[in-house]
Amino acid sequence: MTLGLDTRRDADPTVGALAEPAVRRGLRRRRPPVVEDATARGITTSRDARGPVARAVRRVVYTLLLVGLVLASLGPLLWLAKSAITPTQDTLRHPMALWPNGTDWSNLKTAWVDVQLDRYFLNTIIIAAGSWACQMVVATTGGYVLSVLRPRYARVLNAAVLVTLFVPAVVLLVPLYLTVLDVPLVHRNLINSWWGVVLPAGASAFNVILMKRFFDSLPREVFEAATVDGAGPWRLFWSVTLPMSRPVLGVVSVFAVLAAWKDFIWPLLVLPDPAKQPLSVRLPTLQPIIELDVFLAALLISTALPIIIFLVFQRLFLRSGELSGAIKG
């Protein structure tokens, strides 16, 4: 047998030369066939989805969704702005018409002067500023302790803060009111004072957790370098942590101001004097005794400042790449 094979190869040398590449090609690993995933199939195929008709349909659908979202979010504000400078009869008869009998800009002046909206507006600013300051102090220091300093009992404190998130705010009204009525240790009555509204606002577990999660994402190399350079805990907090935390500071600031601006139940309980009540408490009280157009003008003025504050904080803080300068060099 061996002699016969050798004789054939010697007789025709091209047989071996042609057979060896064929054998090598047969021994190569074959690629598995591409199987289309049945779950990825839809109404149209992938080729149809890339066609001009499908792209045009998607563009129209996305445009309609965007316009719908804009109208749903800005529609009430635009209607309020329109109705604030519209006479009462036009608003009642033609609520969706665009100034059928002209505008009445004096509604804004009447709401600001005759209704004494300036006093309640100032009260709201004082409460919002005090609540913002208390929340920022508690949130930044609490998040800094739990995230950067990390004492041995940090996990216990973190769990305790998280547990408070599951307690409804309504349940805390009675004990919080009793606490403000007679503050422990100092035995002071904070009813009908700014401190009674401002100090309880600082106990926000959500802001503490939000700060902690953001501080956890900061580069630890910066903290280690600052510690090697001799920075203490206070220096590390004021000069290193806070400058790198502008995005989350802006978010917490917006949450704090908006929450204090729209709060109704707690200022109503703590501030029985009408001269110290904010807009959220006084406007529902004044609604039955003033005209509709003046009331809508007062609502427009009360909502203007929160919108401006949000836009300012969004432009100053809510940007991407705020931490790029902190990890250079």
Image: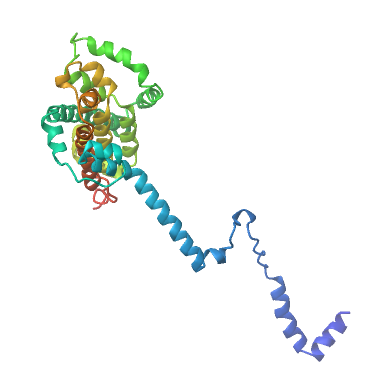
> Residue pushed farthest right?
1
Give x and y (percent) for residue 269: 25, 16
Which quarter of the rendered picture does the N terminus lie within? bottom right
**Would residue 73 be found to the left or right of residue 232 on screen?**
right
245 with respect to 120 (left or right): right
Query: Looking at this view, is 297 or 307 the one in front?
Result: 297
Side of 146 relative to 234 (left or right): right
Q: Nearer the viewer, residue 61 or 110?
A: 110
Determine the residue positioned at 24% across, 21% down: 267
- Residue placed furthest toward the left: 113
From this viewpoint, is residue 228 visible?
Answer: no
Residue 292: x, y in percent? 23, 32
Location of residue 181 with respect to 84 vertically, above or below? above
Tell me the quarter of the picture where residue 134 sits: top left
Residue 285 appears anywhere in the view: yes
Q: Residue at x 24, y 37 (%)?
A: 89
Q: Position of residue 122 (x, y in %)?
A: 13, 29
Q: Residue shown at 31%/30% (left/top)?
A: 208
